Amino acid sequence: MSVKLIAMDLDGTLMAPDHITVTEKTKSALIKANEMGIKTVIATGRTLSVINNVLKQLPFIDYVIYSNGAAVLDRCKGENIYTKPIPADIVSKIVDIFERYPVYYEVYSSGLSHAQESKSGFFKNKDLPQEFLEFYMQSIQNHNSISDFAKNSEIEKINLFYFDGEYYDEIKEQLYALGGLDLTSPVSGDIEMTSAGVNKGEALNGMCKELGFTQEEVMAFGDADNDIEMLQFAGLGIAMANASAECKEAAKYETLSNGEDGIAHAIDKYIFNTAKPKIIVSACLLGENCKYNGGNNFCEAVDNLKEKFELVPICPECFGGLPIPRVPNEIINGRAVSKEGKDYTKEYEDGAEKSLYVANECNCSYAVLKERSPSCGFGMVYDGTFTGKLVKGNGFTADLLYNNGIRVFGESQIDKLLNEFGF
């Protein structure tokens, strides 16, 4: 079933690591999806006043799920189609708790962030870039008394900013004891509070009912614990490579990190790409007699990949000018050395460079390489004693491909490769 709606978290997902920029590659993929009639949705813990810069970069966004799902904005109509604030009595109790501690917190109301000016000295954050923090702080409405403001307003979400941790567990226990709240920590040390049952997944579910979309027609991206319900709801729930372990467990698939245009990569894979993707494969695994002893390492599981991929065979050692058969080599102190002590590092380096050239020319982002080989081994290679013992490390070609953005798998990891492609 085709994708009709794409929902995306912001920080750690759609945004580059600076938390401010949407890269050109990701923007282009989303524009193309929009031109195909696919609805696009931002789903964020931020409030509206802190996403204006995002909407300027992506003005075609159809909906905004904000404050972790406490409200949904229809941008075409310019109005909220859903809100679920925190009950006023619980808001009052939360504020009372925070007023007893040296912490900085904010309350979200009507799309704006509000804080108490006298608390600004307690503002800290260990993870976010300074440029983003300066931009963020400019969006906050300061008050003499946040307690007075909160008593007279509908509060969508309350956010306790990172602090050194002295009172973290103590405060969290008191918040849980209140009941009627959902608590998440999308950024280490933060505590975000919404009314019980409020989350991005529930908001997305309500949107789909309104629009007549099924779960299977939804693609969603996230990286943190406040994205879990959304990823579980979506037919194509996709975690970023930089996501938390819990987030990856909730997702059906995984893509590259936000710093590697993971959203664009997944959109291309699951929506645009109709041709078989190309992958680099060690030729010996396909039965070619290019092994050091003149034989091969035929692997049926690798050979079966031709049903789903266009396979591009390489033999780095042959590329480097080594004959068939040839003396075996292992890696010793970063050099390719034969059992007799002769150094063949240059041949291995030349073969690696030519393999990378082929991968780039064929637009290959994935490789399946012979495990343990001094050329193709990834993660583990022979230790240089020619006794069959293994040590952690990469072969020359595997290391060069990996450091140039190509995902490397061994022949025992075919299931992992297929899962990444959604097969």
Image (cartoon, rainbow, N blue to C red):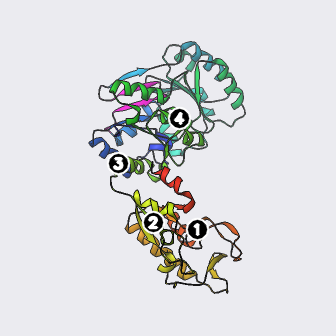
Q: Earlier in the sequence, mark 4 or mark 1?
A: 4
Residue position for label 3: 29
What span is colored magenta in the figure? Answer: 59-77
In space, the residues marked 1 and 3 are separated at their CA atoms by: 34 Å
Q: Give neighbour class at mark 2: few <14, some 14-19, many 20+ (Cα, 10 Å).
A: many
Q: Which residue is drawn at 50% across and 78% down?
A: 290
**Which amino acid type is shown beneath numbered disc 4?**
Ile
Pinpoint residue 156: horizontal percent, then vertical percent.
49, 22
Q: Is residue 321 above or below residue 157?
A: below
SS type, badge 3: helix
Tell me the residue that label 1 is attached to.
377
Residue 9 among those drawn in magenta: no
Badge 1: residue crowd in 10 Å (few <14, some 14–19, many ≥20): many
Q: Report x, y in % for residue 104.
A: 61, 30
Q: Say whether disc 4 or disc 3 marks the residue closer to the N-terminus.
A: 3
Q: Quarter of the image holding residue 328?
A: bottom right
Q: Name the residue under label 4.
A: 228
The earlier-in-sequence mark between 2 and 4 is 4
Please state the horizontal and vertical placement of residue 241, each as a whole percent of the image: 52, 49
Marks 4/3 in contact by CB < 8 Å: the verdict is no
Residue at numbered disc 2? 280
Position of residue 19 measured from the top left corner of the image (x, y, whole percent): 48, 44
Secondary structure under tag 1 reads: loop
